[in-house]
């Protein structure tokens, strides 16, 4: 074999790439990280993320009286993933390894790297109402202090330190266009050098070429992310089981999440599996201060908003806020709904609305306990970024009475004509159910159930009160758009993150991690996620590749 210019090339300076690079350096390898974006983009999507991590049976859960276990988490994972294809062989094995990691080792490893957690554990994806079905039986969403940037920080610091020591090199504005092969082995990369660009982090950078490049290595790790920034690609891969692809979507990820590198790996013989498995949200807001094109922000909803489709019909259970993301998406699309509505009031928004993204949570991102505590102590206002959306966001309608509220919904809904009487009747019927502590309304049952949890009662779930009572007002309606985010399928890999070819055998010299590898195996989530598992999948698969590749 001809001498190589470096031991390892990592394609992508997102979280998965940084973890793989730092693990490889720690084991004595020389590493080059090749990234198409400018330096200010270090950390990729993870920088923008909320930093929510799936942990099982953590001290944070135990302090809140939550009893969790590996077996319960595994039951939830299997009910959620719904593995049902022959190609689920490696995804299933990754899922087993990942849930064990989340229950045994993950927290201690992250704590050792300086990552700590907000003491309040969130209850995401409450599921479809069946013990054996989809969803988290207990709260497991642990937000890292410092949000996404707090998760990226230790790995970025390790990479920067290795750069100073001459063990790692970053090649910014280098876009990989091909994997070089020799006798079936991947031996390097080639691509285009892009013009320098001082564009703001997250905004689309130019694709002006200034030259080309070629680099050889013993191993190449693809850490290039998913496809969620390319709406055409998302629509092309849209599964028939989720209805017709939406004509209008907002983008929950920056433009660099373009999926291009997945096709490049396929051209070198890599096997792509489950491209039709994706994780998009139904609670997207059009960002009033966009950073990237069609920038959407997801609401992380508490359980109390009433949910209506675009015709003003209330969604049936289990399609309740925060329960079943893809089930709700399918329900809405099958009904021909381009969007839907939350209807709530000020006392609900104050307690229950959180927005996903580090820039939307300055209290958590700046690790300010004082500012974070205001979420509990504020009697009237929601967190500032939520109030700002309420004031400036084009999807919000605020009014003191139903007639004005629905008139506003008809304006924002573009061409729809909702009947104020119908909306009012639904709310009145819901409010009437509050006369007793028990109810036949599934949503109210869920709210009361949630409030048995200390964290939910304190931080996330408003006490059930009449929505139409002016004392809890004003009334608020929020148009919810479909928002693209995660790619669940990806390049098929074995447990060492080696990329497999069509014959099921590893392609020598080629590894894949993070979202490009379906967070491990080509899709360790199966059809659905329990949330907080994406950053975790990047950490776990990046670590596995960095370790295994040096051994091999
Ligand atoms: C707003 C937001 C909130 C989120 N919140 C959470 C959360 O709370 N919890 C959770 O678990 N997950 C969350 N996620 C998801 C999670 O952040 C991502 O799935 C994860 O960070 C993906 O990391 P990655 O390293 O695989 O890919 P990326 O971060 O996409 O990085 C890939 C990098 O590869 C580069 N690249 C691509 N192709 C090429 C090429 N051909 N040549 C050179 N470079 C290339 C890209 O420019 C990019 O920098 C969130 C995501 C967003 C956007």
Image (cartoon, helix red, strand yellow):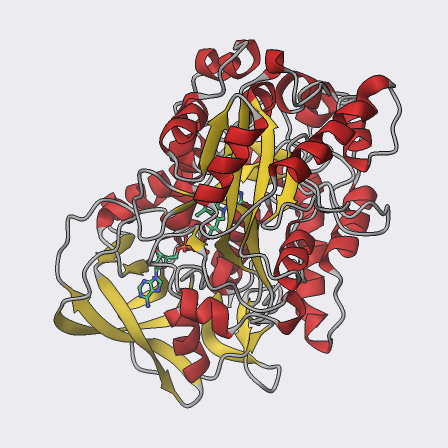
Q: Position of residue 401 (x, y in %)?
A: 56, 24
- Asked if residue 64 can be seen in this view, the reply is yes
Q: Is residue 317 above or below residue 149?
A: below
Identify which residue, 121 or 178, lies in the foreground: 121
The image quadrant where one finds the N terminus is bottom left
In this picture, residue 138 sits left or right of residue 373: right
Q: Position of residue 64 (x, y in %)?
A: 72, 20
Q: Quarter of the image holding residue 4?
A: bottom left
Identify which residue, 213 or 244, lies in the foreground: 244
Q: Is residue 243 above or below residue 62?
A: below
Identify which residue, 119 or 4, lies in the foreground: 119
The residue at the point 61 percent across, 42 percent down is 419
Q: Quarter of the image holding residue 231?
A: bottom left
Q: Quarter of the image holding residue 154?
A: top left
Q: Position of residue 320 (x, y in %)?
A: 70, 41
Give the number of marks.
0
The residue lying furthest to the bottom in this view is: 183
The residue at the point 60 percent across, 29 percent down is 344
The residue at the point 65 percent across, 16 percent down is 469
In this picture, residue 521 sits left or right of residue 30: right
Q: Position of residue 85 (x, y in %)?
A: 73, 74
In this picture, residue 154 sits left or right of residue 528: left
The residue lying furthest to the left in this view is: 210
Identify which residue, 264 or 203, lies in the foreground: 203
The residue at the point 29 percent across, 70 percent down is 176
């Amino acid at each position: 074999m001809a001498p190589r210019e470096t031991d390892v090339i990592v394609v992508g300076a997102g979280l998965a790439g940084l973890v793989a690079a730092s693990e490889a350096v720690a084991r004595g390898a020389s590493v080059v990280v090749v990234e198409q974006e400018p330096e200010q983009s270090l950390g990729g999507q993870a920088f923008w993320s909320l930093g929510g991590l799936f942990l099982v049976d953590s001290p944070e859960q135990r302090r809140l009286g939550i009893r969790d276990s590996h077996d319960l988490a595994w039951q939830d994972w299997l009910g959620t993933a719904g593995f049902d294809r022959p190609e689920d062989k490696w995804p299933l094995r990754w899922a087993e390894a990942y849930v064990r990691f989340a229950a045994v080792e993950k927290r201690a490893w992250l704590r050792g790297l300086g990552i700590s957690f907000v003491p309040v554990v969130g209850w995401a994806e409450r599921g479809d109402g069946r013990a054996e079905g989809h969803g988290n039986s207990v709260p497991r969403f642990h937000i890292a202090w410092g949000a996404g940037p707090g998760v990226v920080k230790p790995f970025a610091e390790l990479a920067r330190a290795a750069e100073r020591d001459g063990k790692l090199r970053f090649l910014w504005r280098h876009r990989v266009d091909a994997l070089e092969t020799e006798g079936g082995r991947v031996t390097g990369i080639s691509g285009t050098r892009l013009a320098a660009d001082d564009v703001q982090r997250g905004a689309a950078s130019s694709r002006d070429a200034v030259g080309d490049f070629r680099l050889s290595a013993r191993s190449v790790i693809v850490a290039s992310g998913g496809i969620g920034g390319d709406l055409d690609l998302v629509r092309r891969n849209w599964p028939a089981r989720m209805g017709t692809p939406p004509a209008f979507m907002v983008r929950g990820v920056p433009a660099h999440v373009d999926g291009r590198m997945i096709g490049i790996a396929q051209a070198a013989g890599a096997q792509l599996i489950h491209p039709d498995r994706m994780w998009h949200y139904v609670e997207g807001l059009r960002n009033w201060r966009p950073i990237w094109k069609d920038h959407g922000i997801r609401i992380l909803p508490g359980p109390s908003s009433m949910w209506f489709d675009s015709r003003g019909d209330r969604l049936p259970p289990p399609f309740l806020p925060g329960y079943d993301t893809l089930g709700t998406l399918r329900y809405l699309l099958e009904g021909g709904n381009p969007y839907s509505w939350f209807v709530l009031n000020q006392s609900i928004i104050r307690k229950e609305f959180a927005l996903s993204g580090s820039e939307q949570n300055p209290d958590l991102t700046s690790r300010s306990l004082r500012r974070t505590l205001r979420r509990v102590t504020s009697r009237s206002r929601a967190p500032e970024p939520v109030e700002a959306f309420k004031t400036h966001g084009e999807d919000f309608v605020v009014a003191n009475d139903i007639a004005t509220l629905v008139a506003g919904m008809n304006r924002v809904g573009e061409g729809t004509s909702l009947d104020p009487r119908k909306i009012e009747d639904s709310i009145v019927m819901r409010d009437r159910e509050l006369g007793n502590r028990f109810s036949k309304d599934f949503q109210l049952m869920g709210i009361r159930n949630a409030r048995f949890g200390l964290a939910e009662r304190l931080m996330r779930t408003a006490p059930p009160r009449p929505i139409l009572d002016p004392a809890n007002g004003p009334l608020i309606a929020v148009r919810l758009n479909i928002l693209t985010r995660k790619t669940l399928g990806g390049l098929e890999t074995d447990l060492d993150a080696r990329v497999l070819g069509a014959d099921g055998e590893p392609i020598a010299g080629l590894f894949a991690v993070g979202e490009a590898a379906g967070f491990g195996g080509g899709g360790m989530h199966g059809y659905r996620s329990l949330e907080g598992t994406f950053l975790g999948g990047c950490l776990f698969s990046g670590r596995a590749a960095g370790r295994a590749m040096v051994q091999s």
